[in-house]
Image (cartoon, rainbow, N blue to C red):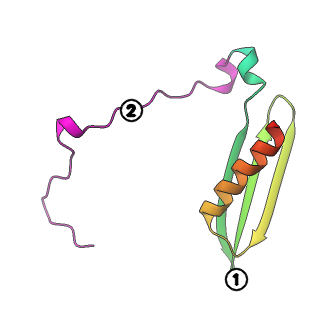
């Protein structure tokens, strides 16, 4: 894409997007919310000529770790797989 030098790409004031609140740190959550906390991530990397993805979920209160790894998928697939693993743990 060719960018125009010196072009101001800021949104006009009427189109500004409101920012959401930051989530509190896990150790600052109330005890009942700590029971539901799950941390997840997914990523993709290239090994040789093959793409490999990995997804992981960790529950600090239950000390549960779930991981999955397979070839030939994208990092977006890995992120969705991490969500699926988290839902499996939560149910």
- The correct choice, above or below, for 36 with respect to 84 in the image is above
Residue for point 74% across, 50% down: 84
Which of the two residues, 88 or 25, is positioned nearer the viewer here? 88
Name the quarter where the C terminus is drawn. top right
Residue 48 is tagged as 1
- Residue 4 image point, x, y percent: 15, 66
Residue at the far left: name it.
Answer: 6
Tell me, yes or no, whether the highlighted magenta stretch contains residue 21: yes
Q: Quick one: SS at disc 1? A: loop
Point out the tag, 2 or 1, that comes first from the N-terminus: 2
Cα distance, mark 2 to mark 1? 41 Å
Residue 90 is tagged as none
- Residue 76 image point, x, y percent: 60, 61
Tell me, yes or no, whether the highlighted magenta stretch contains residue 3: yes
Badge 1: how crowded within 10 Å, few (<14), some, or many (20+)? few
Residue for point 65% across, 69% down: 45
Q: Is residue 9 left or right of residue 37?
A: left
- The correct choice, above or below, for 79 with respect to 70 in the image is above
- The correct choice, above or below, for 6 with respect to 39 in the image is below
Q: Nearer the viewer, mark 2 or mark 1?
A: 2
- Residue 55 image point, x, y percent: 73, 56
Magenta residue span: 1-29
CB within 8 Å, label 2 to label 1:
no
Quadrant of residue 44 within the rendered picture: bottom right
Question: On the image, numbered disc 2 is attached to which residue?
Answer: 19
């Amino acid at each position: 894409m060719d960018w125009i030098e010196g072009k101001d790409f800021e949104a006009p004031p009427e189109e500004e997007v409101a920012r959401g609140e930051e989530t509190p740190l896990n150790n600052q959550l109330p005890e009942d919310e700590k029971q539901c906390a799950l941390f997840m991530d997914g990523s993709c990397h290239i090994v040789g000529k093959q793409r490999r993805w990995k997804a992981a979920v960790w529950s600090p209160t239950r000390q549960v770790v779930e991981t999955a790894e397979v070839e030939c998928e994208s990092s977006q697939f890995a992120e969705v797989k991490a969500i699926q693993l988290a839902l499996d743990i939560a149910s």
